[in-house]
Image (cartoon, rainbow, N blue to C red):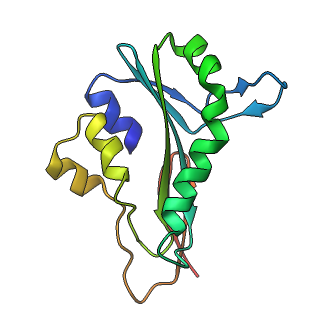
Amino acid sequence: MLSKEAKKTDWILYPESHITDTKNELFKPDLIFVKEHRAYVVDMTVRFEDNTSTLADAAKEKVEKYQHLHKEIQDLTNATEVNFVGFPLGTQGKWYSKNYELLSVLGLSKSRQERTAWPKPPEHFSPLWTFANKSCTIIVT
């Protein structure tokens, strides 16, 4: 969904780029958005919300995982400004409020941001949220 929304506002998309660091380790961030001189490296994750900081911690982990690839991202995208974003989603439908910052950067209106926000599952489901073929699927367990 992020890819589709970003393309509407003229962002160039690099999905699941294979990037090798200086130690020859392979990294595959989910999405890299590029517009003008800016690049946003976005890695999504789905986590069980077992405490109030779970999603914030997950976002931080994703940033730390990729931020050492600054030069490699610049080489790939020709961007002079590189930003790293963790985009966590909760298994029980919790939406990490800082995800809105990326949606805003991508140019989504406030109303479109709300429609794009992670859907809340029906309370009688015990869902396992997964990503398959770049779309979200609910598996009822």
Locate the N terminus and report the quarter of the image it occupies: top left
Q: Residue 85 at what x, y percent from top left?
A: 48, 42
Q: Residue 105 at what x, y percent from top left?
A: 29, 35
Q: Nearer the viewer, residue 40 or 133?
A: 40
Q: Quadrant of residue 38?
A: top left
Residue that appears at 46% across and 84% down: 125
Q: Nearer the viewer, residue 29 or 63?
A: 63
The number of discs equals: 0
Q: Nearer the viewer, residue 125 or 56?
A: 56
Q: Residue 111 at what x, y percent from top left?
A: 15, 51
Q: Quick check: can you spot residue 83? A: yes
Locate the C terminus and report the quarter of the image it occupies: bottom right
Q: Nearer the viewer, residue 5 or 48?
A: 48
Does 126 sit above or below residue 82? below
Q: Quadrant of residue 64?
A: top right
**Residue farthest right in this picture:** 23
Q: Residue 81 at what x, y percent from top left?
A: 44, 20
**Residue farthest bottom in this picture:** 124
Residue that appears at 38% across and 42% down: 2
Position of 39 compared to 24: left or right? left
Does 27 sit above or below residue 14? below
Residue that appears at 51% across and 71% down: 91
Does 138 sit above or below residue 51? above
Position of 114 compared to 47: left or right? left
Q: Quick check: can you spot residue 137? A: no
Position of 65 compared to 3: left or right? right
Residue that appears at 34% across and 66% down: 119
